[in-house]
Amino acid sequence: MLNFKFNRHLKLILCTCLMSCLPFAIGCSYIFSSIILSKLKEPTSTIKIDTEDSSWIASFPILVCPIGLLIVGIITDKLGRRKALQFGYIPIIISWLVLTYANSLKAIMIGRIMQGISLGSGTCVYLYLAEVCPTEYRPLYFSVVTIFVGMGMVAVSVMSLFIDWQTISLILFVVCTVNCASLFLVPETPMWLRTHGRSQEADAAEAWLCMEPETVPASAVAPVSGMTVNGDDHLCSEDGTTATGKPTNAAYWTLFASPTVWKPALITMLFFICQQGSGFYVLVFYSVDVLHDCRVQWDGVTVTAFLSLSRVIGSVVYTMLHHVRRKTLVVVSSGGMALSLATIIVYMRMYKDVASPPYGMVLVFAFITYVFFGLLAMLPLPWAICGEVFPMAVKGVVLIIVFYYVCNGWNRTSFWIRVNVFSHKSLPCICVDIWN
């Protein structure tokens, strides 16, 4: 029995690491905007950009993200979690190849647009893990995904200190290509296979994952006769109809009006609004600019590397605290972020007229703690709960709605504010302006 559990966790670790390679690449694309902007602004750069070009380079991935979300969401529900994840690799592989040979601003824009199509694919990882991991260990495996995102940011930050951005793009092209091919080593989730009438493949997947029969959700074993876990009362039986005898399509669209769909959607949407409102992604995409606007006296690229390292450390701590109640983690995380931002605002307020502000280490430390506390809950938890609270049959489509109307809507608004109102001032600078 002990050996059986060991083998199962070994398989889950393999699946988690292989699946998390796409979040690793997404983490690389997050921080890549700050790195490439700092390099393009150097006098020796052959590609010249202005302030508006900088905003387009950093914001394009978020602006075009819904295109990829729409396609990936449909594939997630119709063709499976693993295939959706493999599809998500295609645009980002193309993007790194384009950036490798980019010799103009137009080519860089095209590469960044292709990266944006892949950003939403990371949700497939949480869906996959939510369906194959034991409930008691699910937060632990979810946290590994967050660590991989941070590792991607650290990898790009460190590489940028020694090699140029085009060589970094080539390395990431090779890494993403290998990772995409490696996904053929893992099976589709047994739950998804059963809901699509592929019982023999589901049995084989369960055997490969060393899943005990009692760990398979009841809603995925036989035709459903009533309200089941996560509201999956409209799952398909093997004859192509629902448990109530209604046509599959009718049951599918009726499910969206169920309280088991709109209530979790409302909760996760509010959670995402708080996440986006924290300003974390503004710091990620514009880290060098934010640090410069806040008059951080250290080199922006170096501090960005420290921020990425802080993200990894925060992810590791989050992993160690997987047994702690999530509400407690959210309170600690949001409180720490608020305190860190307050420190930054007060510091800038006190020394706004000073040419060379003293105690510069305080500002650097505040940014590092801000990132650390963000990784304790506010960053990873909204993504994690999306894979747990929605009915099986509509997870992909509902995630499109939540991500599009909250994340993309907020980032479009913040992008417009940065370009047209505050002229690329960072979030702490905006807060100081409002305070004044």
Image (cartoon, rainbow, N blue to C red):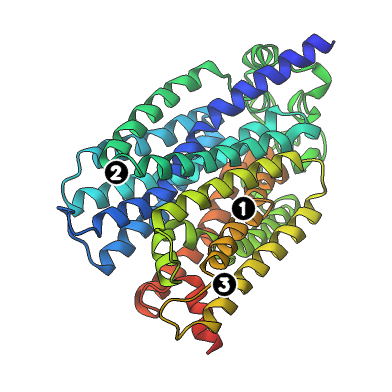
Residue at the spot 70% in from the left edge and 51% down from the top edge = 261
- Of residues 290 and 406, the one drawn nearer to the viewer in this rendering: 290
- The answer to whether residue 381 is above or below residue 42 is above
Residue at the spot 36% in from the left edge and 58% down from the top edge = 58
Q: Circle 2 sits on which residue?
A: 165
- The answer to whether residue 192 is above or below residue 358 is above
Q: Circle 3 sits on which residue?
A: 344
Number of on-image labels: 3
Asked where in the image residue 333 lies, by quadrant, the reply is: bottom right
Tag nearer the camera, 1 or 2: 2
**Tag 2: residue type?**
Trp
- The answer to whether residue 17 is above or below residue 423 is above
Label 2, residues with CA under 10 Å away: few <14, some 14-19, many ≥20: many
Does residue 404 appear left or right of residue 89 in this picture? right
Picture coordinates of residue 206 (x, y %)?
Answer: 69, 16
- Along the polypeptide, which appears first: circle 1 or circle 2? 2
Q: Give the distance between the C-alpha atoms of the residues marked 1 and 2, in whole angstroms.
A: 27 Å
**Which secondary structure lies at badge 1?**
loop
Is residue 250 in sight in this rendering?
no
Picture coordinates of residue 369 (x, y %)?
Answer: 62, 58
- The answer to whether residue 354 is above or below residue 105 is below
CB within 8 Å, label 3 to label 1: no
Q: Circle 1 sits on which residue?
A: 379
Picture coordinates of residue 15 (x, y %)?
Answer: 60, 24
